[in-house]
Amino acid sequence: MHLLPWVLNIIAFTPRYFAVDFDAKWVFLNTVNYGGLIEIQISYIIVHLQILVYLILSYKLIKKYKTLLLENFSNASLLNYKWLFQFVTIFAIESFVATLKNIVRFSADETFYFYSQLVTSILAFGFMCWIVLKALHNSELFRGVDSKLQLVKDLIKKDISNNDELTNINTQENEKIIELKEYMLSEEPYLDPSLSVSSLANEMKIPDKELSVLINHYLNQHFFDFINEYRIEKAKKLLVSIERKEHTILEILYEVGFNSKSSFNTAFKKYAKVTPTEYRKKQ
């Protein structure tokens, strides 16, 4: 499928270029109105259609990546899909400008074409600078996520088709959920800021897939939200604790497993409907 545009280009150029002798090739390449050749126009149309398809597929992959992060990790700093969205969006804008430039190319206005080339080049340079600066200031963005991770909906489909070990959850889900919640309350694994489905499954000595399906499917919560709910409940207790009245909100958020004030405030307001400061004052 990736080679299809190339094949279509070869087919378009074969009759008047690849299938003729050297002299005919030379005449073809030295055509005065080069942009007016139907083969060239077809080639540009194919290229821009290919870019459009890749952009659509890229947005779909980013959406999948975001879901994978929410289903498997509790650390908000790992939710770096936003920069990927920015990356693709900036590239889409650059591609749109380049498309306009190439439309102008087939017109007779050479001056306008020159300035459109200049604008496209400046945008391309800015795009490359942005990527470099993003990489220098946010090295954690390029920390990989296991390529073998699967969406829970795909695991469920696989379970149905293959009748594998996940089917055991269907009859034991309530017991497993009770066991999971008891473990969360007694052992408080959510206090670990780097907690993931994999590390929690290792602690509980159950398969990763089973735990992921249990939380994301049967509890109908992303792992990220499931863990944050426990962290916020713990934070609410600490915020009103007499022993912790001298502790700052920053100290408490680190203690309950968060690693940034912004992610803590966002999560706290989501579950408590007020900010941590407001909650403390009310209590």
Image (cartoon, rainbow, N blue to C red):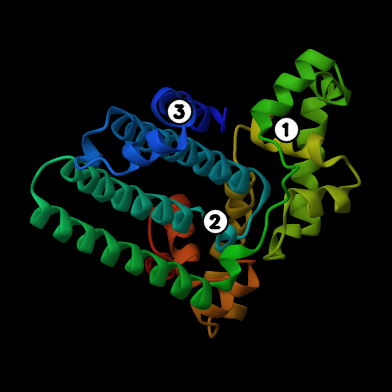
Q: Please indicate whether residue 263 sits to the left or right of residue 31 in the image.
A: right
Q: Quadrant of the C terminus?
A: bottom left
Which is more toward the observer, 94 or 14?
14
**Residue under numbered circle 1:** 213
C-alpha gap between disc 3 and disc 1: 61 Å
Query: Mark 2 and mark 3 in contact (Cβ < 8 Å)?
Result: no
Q: Please indicate whether residue 269 sits to the left or right of residue 3 in the image.
A: left
Q: Which image quadrant is residue 12 in?
A: top left
Q: Give the percent coordinates (x, y) of residue 237.
A: 58, 64
Q: Please indicate whether residue 274 sits to the left or right of residue 186 in the image.
A: left
Residue 240 appears in the picture as rendered? no
SS state under label 2: loop
SS state under label 3: loop
**Mark 2 / mark 1, whichever is N-terminal:** 2
On residue 79, the disc is 2
Q: Give the percent coordinates (x, y) of residue 90.
A: 34, 55
- Where 165 falls versus 178 (above or below)? above
Q: Give the percent coordinates (x, y) of residue 23.
A: 40, 37
Q: Nearer the viewer, mark 3 or mark 1?
A: 3
| Circle 2: residue type | Leu
Residue 135 appears in the picture as rendered? yes
On residue 20, the disc is 3
Which is more toward the observer, 222 or 82?
82
Query: Mark 1 and mark 2 in contact (Cβ < 8 Å)?
Result: no
| Circle 1: residue type | Val
On residue 39, the disc is none
